[in-house]
Amino acid sequence: MLDPSTEEIQRRNAVIGRVLSFVRENRTIKLPAFDPNVDRPDDQFALLSVGIEPNDFSGTVGDFRYQFEGEEDLLHLMITRRERLPLTVEESQVVAEFLYRGVAPALVWLRPGEFSQHFYVGHDDLLGEIVSVI
């Protein structure tokens, strides 16, 4: 069960608003450059350190971190635990639903992992489904 705070909801709305703006303007959403002064890479899995650096396309909710990036016509959402521990598909799906409010689950493709879960949705599908929510 996810019980987002007011700040987490506001952050989600701001991040999704920026995502939608970039998609409408056909701009690429890039991952932040790694900053060794902020954090160092994870010893086991590189993707656990992606999005630690503050950036316009990431946030946290509960025990989870999320990071968006654009991949041609797909939007990639990465979800990890803030403590870098394993997470289940079901836990990450709750976070994805929080972020993709209004997007039909059938439009979201999942690539599961042990420490990070990855969700993909087409830009056109995102614009058609989520615009009325934010």
Image: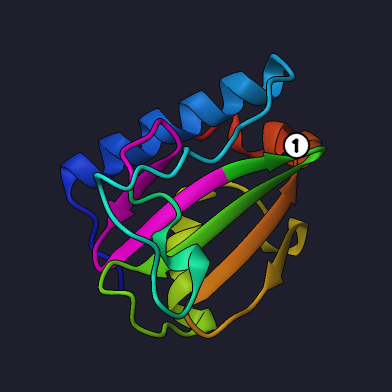
Percent x, y for residue 42?
Answer: 39, 70
Q: Position of residue 59 (x, y in %)?
A: 34, 46
Which quarter of the image is occupied by the N terminus? bottom left
Would you say residue 38 sits in the magenta stretch? no
The answer to whether residue 67 is magenta is yes
Residue furthest to the front in view is: 36
For the point 28% across and 54% down, the residue is 39
Q: Residues within 10 Å of mark 1 (few under 14, many from 20)?
A: many
- Which quarter of the picture shows residue 113? bottom right
Residue 75, x across and y down, in percent: 68, 44
Colour mapping? rainbow
Residue topped by disc 1: 123
Specify the segment rendered in magenta.
Answer: 53-68
Q: Position of residue 95 (x, y in %)?
A: 43, 63
Q: Is residue 98 visible?
A: yes
In the shown orientation, is residue 23 left or right of residue 92? right
Reply above or below: 65 against 99: below
